[in-house]
Image (cartoon, grey):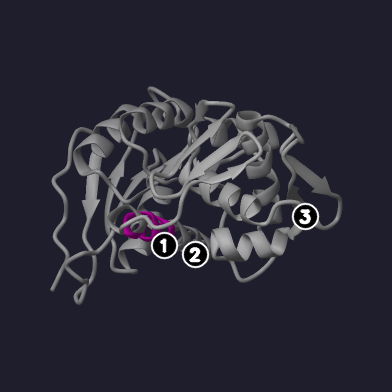
Amino acid sequence: MTASAFPTGTGATSAGGPAGTPAQAANILVVEDEPAIATAIAQRLSAEGWRVEVARDGLSGVEAATRLRPDVIVLDVMLPGIDGLEVTRRIQAEQPVPILMLTARDDETDMLIGLGVGADDYMTKPFSMRELVARVKALLRRVDRAAQAATSTPTDPPMVVGDVVIDRAQRRVHRAGEEVHLTPTEFELLVMLASSPKTVLTRERLLAEVWDWADASGTRTVDSHIKALRRKLGPDLIRTVHGVGYAFEPPVA
């Protein structure tokens, strides 16, 4: 059947999926003020069978996220009204959702700020639609894994490595008794590193296991997420092995 379009709010338009879309198709919110880019993204994502709504400015994006409860948000940084960073803060404060941030500036500082306020991934304009779809699919797989973990009966006790406690069932992290709020991607990255303490994991392996990427084109993404983790957990937990990858090495008490 044809996926029905969501009702639209101020500044928003909607795009339904093609015939044959499953009833439980993912809901994607695109927040982009450039009409040509917004239309191209919406059409490409709709062709995957996902239900897509487009908001044209920051305030409309926040309103649409509250109303739709989307599975993934594709969000431009430069928006009229309030920018994508503030949109991310407001959305994540209400209910965490995976956010793929789009930026026109290839500046790592901007990318780290985006990750710091709650984005899970980022892409620099111009980008290929094929890669955009791949990134969204990876985020949806993580959403599915998190949902399965939330509904399953926990059998594993929390991981305790040094003064870091990782509760995989509740997806919560504490260090030295203080809770640390991580994005879904940061959480999965930390779990993978902490599961093999003192073991050097390559960027390529981290990409494959955490991001579901089959190639090494996103190693810079790994580096940026590691920096975001260090900002939240402290610089002493993750060791860089130059040219190879990273190792989780909590300090000895």
* Separation of residues labelled 1 and 2 (CA atoms): 11 Å
Q: How far across and down, in percent of the image, does residue 101 sit?
A: 49, 43
For the point 59% across and 47% down, the residue is 190
Question: For this rendering, which residue is in front, 246 or 9?
Answer: 246
State the image quarter where residue 236 is shown: top right
Q: Which residue is mark 1?
A: 141
Q: Which numbered disc covers residue 245?
A: 3
Nearer-N-terminus badge (3/2): 2
Q: Which residues are magenta?
A: 140-148
In the image, residue 80 lies at what x, y percent? Answer: 40, 27
Residue type highlighted by circle 2: Ala
Q: Secondary structure at mark 1?
A: helix
Query: What element does badge 3 sit on?
Result: strand
In this rendering, would 109 be left or right of 34? Answer: right
User: What is the number of the mark on residue 164?
Assistant: none
Residue 124 visible in the picture: no
The disc at residue 134 is 2
Q: Amino acid at mark 3?
A: Gly
| Secondary structure, magenta segment, majority class | helix
Residue 140, placed above or below residue 234: below
Q: Is residue 250 above or below residue 152?
A: above
Q: CA distance from mark 3 to mark 2?
A: 23 Å
